[in-house]
Every structure is written in structure tokens, then in C-alpha cells.
Image (cartoon, rainbow, N blue to C red):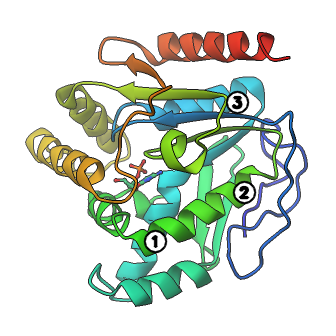
């Protein structure tokens, strides 16, 4: 299930009705020629999520956090004692995964698996690393890519963030952004984020974990992290989030005005 709470602080989507991410109950896909998709890809800590949320909020668009789908699979796989050497079981898990996205009153995206709110549980360093490994499996990627496309097709305008949104999932997106930042800066941001949420945050360990994830995400055989040829590349190392948001909103505005 993919739901948006009626009490959302800003209408990110056109209609507050339930949306489904589960392959068990597929919904008809609505294709509209006027649909605009903006993809934001980049490595961990490049600022994709914060940027995508801000852009969606500013434009009142649908926001799709595709990393959360891989994190939910990893979370559930861990609970069921599965590892990446069990691709068939993971495939089955993906096909039956009961996944809800809900917008909380403060605008945060809440991730619900099997009726339980796992939004915080899927953000640990352990799940980050496991999600990155689980996401190397073609079975898992195929299932998640299908769900991401089904979901996006139901909305007029979508800003989606991940690793392969501009290259694989939405190759025809009207605007593709590739965000990057130095690995040290990304580790600092992650450290701050963990500290703010009261979790242990050792800079050297974080740096090492990010390097490992970068390596895993960019060297996997299926849909590796790479900038689409037609992506606008933005290095955010020395930019504030406000500056990046302003730049991306300008790019979107320029695309919109140049559309027939
Ligand atoms: O964006 P994130 O850190 O929440 O993503 C968690 C992991 O999921 C990341 O290490 C790689 C994987 N992922 C992916 O392979 N493709 C995506 N589109 C999004 C995330």
C-alpha cells in the first residue's frame, strides 16, 4: 500500500487516496503526456533526499524516495533471517512486501512495513549497508523498478531520487540532476544527521562506511550509480541546501517554459 495521510501539510499529490506499491494488488497505470518527471540521483550524503523533499514541497509535486524501498526490503529480509545469497527468497519477499508510504503532519515521509512504522528503523547504519548489498540483486531491482514506475505513473508531476532514476527507471525524464559532494563532506553531513537523531556517530567509521557503499553502489553489475549522459551535474560540497534548491527550481522553470 502507498498512502498519503489526508492531514499532510502540503498537497504533494493530486488526490488523497490510497496508492499501492505492492505487486500483489497492481493498479492501472495512468500515462499523461503532460507528466513531468525530475530525477535526482547521486551517492549517499549528496543531499538528494533533502533536495527532493524541498523541491516537491515548493512545487506541490509527488516525492518518491526510492532508497526507502530498498531499505524496506533489507529491513524485512533481516527480520526474516535472509541474506543476499538467497535471491529466490528475496524475490518472493519483494513480491509480497506490504509497503506503505505516508506523509506525517510535519511533512516527513513515514515508511510502513506490514503495518508497522519502520521509518527510523530503516535509517540505521546496519540497514544502510545491507540495503546497498540487497540492491545489487537483479531480482530485487526489477521488482522495485516496476513498483517505482507504477507509482510515478499515477501522478502528474514527480520528483524522484535514488541512484538509477535518470539512467534506468525514468530514462525519458524531462530533467535529470546528478548531485555529488566530496566523500569527506558527505561523511560530515551523515555524522550531523546521526547526532541529531541521537544515534552514535563516529566520523572515521562513517567515512569508511560511505566509501564502501559508494563502491558497492557504483560497481554493481545491474544499474550502477552513474550520471545519465543528459544529467545536469551539481557538486554540492560548497553549496548550501538553499542554493542547490534555488538552482534546481530554476532548471525546472526553464524546462517548463521551453515545453510546447
Ligand atoms: O538513498 P538511500 O541511501 O536511502 O539508499 C539506500 C540504498 O539503496 C543505497 O545504498 C543503494 C540502494 N538504492 C539503489 O540501489 N537504487 C536506488 N534508486 C535507491 C537506492
On screen, 208 above or below 57? below
Front one among 124 and 253: 253
Residue that badge 2 annotates: 151
Residue ID at (39%, 36%): 42
Q: Is ligand 1 closer than 8 angstroms to the Cβ of mark 3?
A: no
The mark lying in front, picked from 2 and 3, is 2
Helix, strand or loop under label 2 = helix
Residue ID at (63%, 77%): 98
On screen, 109 above or below 91? above
Helix, strand or loop under label 1 = helix
Q: Position of residue 67 (x, y in %)?
A: 47, 53
Q: Position of residue 82 (x, y in %)?
A: 33, 86
Residues under labels 2 and 3: Cα distance? 18 Å
Using a 10 Å C-alpha cutoff, classify the residue at mark 3 as few (fewer than 14 neighbours), some (14 to 19) or many (20 or more). some
Query: In the rendered view of the protein, which quadrant contains the C terminus?
Result: top right
Residue that badge 1 annotates: 140
Residue that badge 3 annotates: 57
Residue ID at (51%, 32%): 50
Front one among 34 and 128: 34
**Residue 114 appears in the rendering:** yes
Q: Position of residue 208 (x, y in %)?
A: 11, 46
Q: Is ligand 1 closer than 8 angstroms to the Cβ of mark 2?
A: no
Front one among 253 and 260: 260
Q: Give the image quarter of residue 99.
A: bottom right
**Residue 119 appears in the rendering:** no
Check contact, mark 2 vs mark 3: CB within 8 A: no
Mark 2 or 3, nearer chain start: 3
Amino acid at each position: 500500500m502507498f498512502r498519503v495521510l489526508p492531514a499532510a501539510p502540503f498537497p504533494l499529490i493530486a488526490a488523497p487516496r490510497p496508492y499501492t506499491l505492492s505487486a500483489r494488488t497492481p493498479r492501472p497505470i495512468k500515462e499523461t503526456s503532460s507528466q513531468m518527471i525530475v530525477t535526482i540521483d547521486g551517492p549517499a550524503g549528496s543531499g538528494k533526499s533533502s533536495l527532493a523533499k524541498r523541491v516537491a514541497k515548493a512545487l506541490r509535486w509527488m516525492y518518491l524516495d526510492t532508497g526507502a524501498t530498498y531499505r524496506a526490503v533489507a529491513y524485512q529480509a533481516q527480520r526474516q533471517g535472509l541474506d543476499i545469497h538467497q535471491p529466490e527468497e528475496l524475490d518472493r519477499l519483494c513480491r509480497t512486501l506490504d509497503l506503505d508510504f505516508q506523509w506525517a503532519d510535519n511533512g516527513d515521509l513515514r515508511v510502513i512495513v506490514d503495518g508497522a512504522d519502520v521509518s527510523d528503523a530503516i535509517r540505521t547504519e546496519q540497514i544502510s549497508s545491507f540495503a546497498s548489498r540487497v540492491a545489487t540483486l537483479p531480482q530485487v531491482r526489477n521488482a522495485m523498478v516496476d513498483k517505482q514506475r507504477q507509482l510515478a505513473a499515477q501522478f502528474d508531476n514527480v520528483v524522484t531520487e535514488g541512484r538509477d532514476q535518470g539512467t534506468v527507471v525514468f530514462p525519458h525524464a524531462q530533467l535529470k540532476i546528478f548531485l555529488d559532494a566530496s566523500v569527506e563532506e558527505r561523511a560530515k553531513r551523515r555524522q550531523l544527521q546521526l547526532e541529531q537523531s541521537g544515534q552514535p556517530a563516529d566520523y572515521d567509521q562513517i567515512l569508511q562506511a560511505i566509501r564502501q557503499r559508494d563502491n558497492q553502489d557504483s560497481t554493481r553489475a545491474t544499474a550502477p550509480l552513474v550520471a545519465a549522459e543528459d544529467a545536469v551535474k551539481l557538486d554540492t560540497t560548497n553549496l548550501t541546501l538553499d542554493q542547490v534548491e534555488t538552482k534546481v527550481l530554476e532548471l525546472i522553470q526553464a524546462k517548463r517554459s521551453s515545453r510546447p
